[in-house]
Amino acid sequence: MPDIDDLTTRMRDFSIQRDWEQFHDPKSLMLALVGEVGELAELFQWLPAEKAAALAQEEPLRRRAGEEMSDVLLYLVRLADVLGIDLAEAAAAKMSSSEDRFHPDEYQGAAPVKE
Amino acid sequence: MPDIDDLTTRMRDFSIQRDWEQFHDPKSLMLALVGEVGELAELFQWLPAEKAAALAQEEPLRRRAGEEMSDVLLYLVRLADVLGIDLAEAAAAKMSSSEDRFHPDEYQGAAPVKE
Amino acid sequence: MPDIDDLTTRMRDFSIQRDWEQFHDPKSLMLALVGEVGELAELFQWLPAEKAAALAQEEPLRRRAGEEMSDVLLYLVRLADVLGIDLAEAAAAKMSSSEDRFHPDEYQGAAPVKE
Amino acid sequence: MPDIDDLTTRMRDFSIQRDWEQFHDPKSLMLALVGEVGELAELFQWLPAEKAAALAQEEPLRRRAGEEMSDVLLYLVRLADVLGIDLAEAAAAKMSSSEDRFHPDEYQGAAPVKE
């Protein structure tokens, strides 16, 4: 089963089984997502930029980064589910759109425009 | 192919083909992720909380929400790839951990502890 | 002494005295700011929107909200200082700009355009 | 008049005059704050970390950074006002707390603990 659909179903069942759907309106889920993004940011904030990727290979940072990225993803798939949006399909379409919009020759090594 | 792995590969190839890997250190990708989360937040900020989900069914909000959620996901999978973390595996493990940690009977209808 | 200038001076001295200036490049301070915004968001995420302001009058939420808002402000003034930007002056100018841009008659009760 | 109090009063009057108080519940203001933090992050995301401060001295980046930092500050003071929290007082108290908590001798040059 595609993993985004699988996570979506598991988060939905998880919420239903705990009667937490009542808390999962879009604005509340957005704030929960922001909270997890903040925890992820804190892991990297004081690391030297050029060493951050290497330092993130060491524990406990590596495990914590995986957990915080997972929390961000889980709230994101939950938000998409609440909105009735197929996140996997939307992301694949956005990826195709960027591949067309930013031609390799034109954007070669040029600081990417914010997508 | 699992969709997270597929998006990861497409974002990696997309970056290599444009020589954008040089910009994709963890702290820069984190800030790009924050930028996309901000754009997603702006879509919902002034909507009445109880009507947000319904209003998000209408265009152009529905399409824009899908695009911004996709941007968040694409930078998240890119960050995981740069860190060498299997996001699909990490998210499935985090989901299992939460299912065990928050027993349905104990947390029934209780405002969820931040996960 | 104007309070923003005072906080700016105190954060600068605080950083110098601990030899923390080396950590305070703009991107690191931005991630630290994001971390504090995330902690602030977590305080409100599951509160019913219409009761959030009232619930925030109760302790310990009221004290925690003040602390997290303070952390956001302190990193913001530190970032402005590192960039050599007069935040108090810039904010007063932005306020004047918004007062001119959004005429009360034209925007009366209309969902505010993102500023 | 202290600048934070001045900005607070101006944002309050600005909101009352446009009948926008109805939109300014804590969760909505939090999302608006997140939106502005995202716009600020986008200004720095792809800049080389070690050159970011210098590059931010050049226009139009310098002006834009001042405007986005101002937007963050204005929503922060508005949120504090809605919560009835004296942000200037809270920030001064948090600053004093950090000055006491992180003794210069103990934290000399050591990556700061997240405050």
Image (spheres, coloured by chain):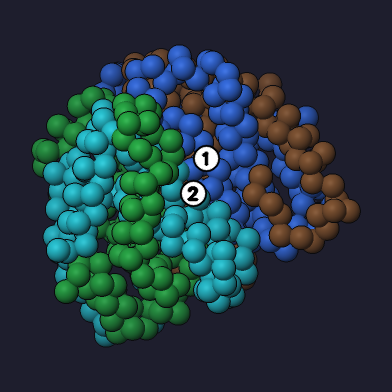
Chain colours: A cyan, B green, C blue, D brown
Q: Quadrant of the N terminus of chain C?
A: top right
Q: CA distance from mark 2 to mark 1?
A: 7 Å
At label 2, the amino acid type is Gly
Query: Residue A82: horizontal and vertical position, in percent?
Result: 20, 40
Residue B54 as seen in the image, left or right of residue D6:
left
In the displayed structure, does residue C66 sit left or right of residue C10? left
Residue plotted at (21% across, 62% down): A3
Residue C28 shown left or right of residue B65 in the figure? right
Q: Which of D15/D34 is in front? A: D34
Q: Residue at horizontal 73%, vertical 63%?
A: C22
Do marks 2 and 1 share a chain? Answer: no
Say if residue C63 shows up in the picture. yes
Crowding at mark 2 (Cα within 10 Å: few <14, some 14-19, many 20+)? many
Q: Which residue sits at x=36%, y=70%?
A: B86
Task: Please determine whether, in this image, residue A23 is positioned above or below residue B83.
Answer: above
> Residue at horizontal 82%, vertical 39%?
D100
- Is label 1 in a helix, a strand or a loop? helix
In the depicted structure, whether residue C17 falls above or below residue A24: below
Q: Amino acid at mark 1?
A: Glu
Q: Secondary structure at mark 2?
A: helix
Q: Is residue D60 visible?
A: no
- Identify the image quadrant of the C terminus of chain C: top left
Q: Are marks 2 and 1 in contact (CB under 8 Å)?
A: yes
Looking at the image, residue A90 lies above or below residue D74: below
Identify the residue under disc 2.
Answer: A38
- Left-right relation of A68 to C32: left
Which residue is denoted by mark 1 in the rendering?
A: C39
In percent of width and height, residue D12 lies at: 48, 19
Q: Mark 1 — on which chain does it sit?
A: C
Corner quadrant of residue A70? bottom left
